[in-house]
Amino acid sequence: MLAIANLSNSRVLRLIVPIVVILSLVCTLYADWKPVQKIIPSSIPPSVVSAISDPSPASTPQISEKASPSKSKFHDSIANTSISNIPDKAWHSAKTDDISETQRKWVNSWSSTTPQCRQELLTDRSGEAFVRAYYQETRPDIVEVIESLSIPILRADLLRYLIVLAEGGYWSDLDVTLEKPLSEWVPAEYKDRNIDMIVGLEFDFAYRGPEAEVASQFCNWVFAAQPSSCNLLVIVNTVINKLEEIAKTNKVSISGIKLEMLRDVVNVTGPKIMTIAILESLGQLLGRTVDDRDFSGIKHPKLVGDVLIMPGVSFAASQNGFPTDQGDALVTHHYEGSWKQADAEAKERKKQKEQEDHGVQSQQG
């Protein structure tokens, strides 16, 4: 009888031990996943909004202020940091996790070229969950906007800024191949400098004068930033203000915004608004105007304030004519973006409507 009892106890122990181990692992993984709440201020200078607004008599709505540090204090809080504060992690997003074999090959280039690089692919569903987890407590306005947007490209643009703002790292679209290890991105002279963000020139144009909008443009298919990046924060606030302005002008909610209402996607959530917001952010940090004159024609990476600006060859070699005097390309962009067709169709619909409206007015006249 005693032998039977011992045998039974032995079996119970063999069952209990692996269960305890599995439960411990689950608890550990959950603890690692749960996001750390970060301070995400909402303040944004009015000049940022006015610099990117379409000509319109409508006034620009402002995001309500919350108890949060000013931008200058936010800069001070991350002073004296180094490039190591940009994690070796690449972020990607897709509608679902069922990406093509070609896209998988491009995405895998990040870890094959930089073995220490971690990667995460967020889908539409997990992306929304990510935003709720990080921003619901401190910035519910962000959660409301991302969940209301019905246009995929607007959501995709805003999502990338929010993801990297929350945890830092490298953003890469699915159609981007990493060509050079991340360790080779930053020149030796900047290794010990505070680099809040890394961007690359998509269009490299000369200065056009004080009354003209900035001519050059940073690409947003690849960029990098520290967690809680002060420059990304300005981008996010600028995009949200712009979306609210468009909704108000067209007398619709955020969910009612259509592509036909936009002058161009790049001016609303894309590279152009990103560029202007970064330059405004740097202007506040440096106490002066920052524009094309600070980086136009650069042959090597240049640190302006706390933003490392890469020459055209780095992120957009084909767009800049494959220059041979700017070093090597760091990535290759394969230009597979599907949003351009929808944008072109929306512009055509807008053009047709304007022609119809003009015809009606001519008949009435």
Image (spheres, rainbow, N blue to C red):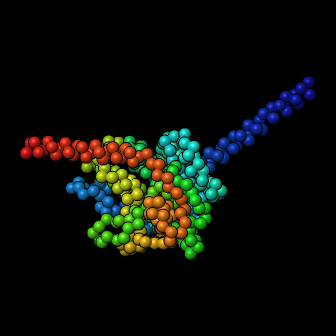
Q: Can residue 324 be seen in this view?
A: yes
**To which quarter of the image does residue 285 belong?**
bottom left
Residue 159: percent from left, percent from top: 46, 50
**Rendered residue at 32%/60% (across/down):** 52
Picture quarter with the C terminus: top left
Residue 188: percent from left, percent from top: 59, 73
Total count of labels: 0
Residue 68: percent from left, percent from top: 43, 60
**Rendered residue at 62%/54% (across/down):** 111
Q: In this rendering, would 177 be left or right of 267?
A: right
Q: In this rendering, would 217 be left or right of 62?
A: right
> Does residue 70 lie above or below 241 as drawn?
below
Q: In this rendering, would 257 be left or right of 235?
A: left
Q: Nearer the viewer, residue 363 or 69?
A: 363
Q: Nearer the viewer, residue 199 or 313?
A: 313
> Does residue 40 lie above or below 356 as drawn?
below
**Rendered residue at 43%/51% (across/down):** 157
Residue 51: percent from left, percent from top: 31, 62
Q: Which of 18 and 223 is in front in this view?
A: 223
Q: Residue farthest to the left? A: 365
**Rendered residue at 52%/57% (across/down):** 332
Q: In this rendering, would 235 be left or right of 168?
A: left
> Does residue 88 lie above or below 32 as drawn?
below
Q: Nearer the viewer, residue 264 or 64?
A: 264
Picture quarter with the N terminus: top right
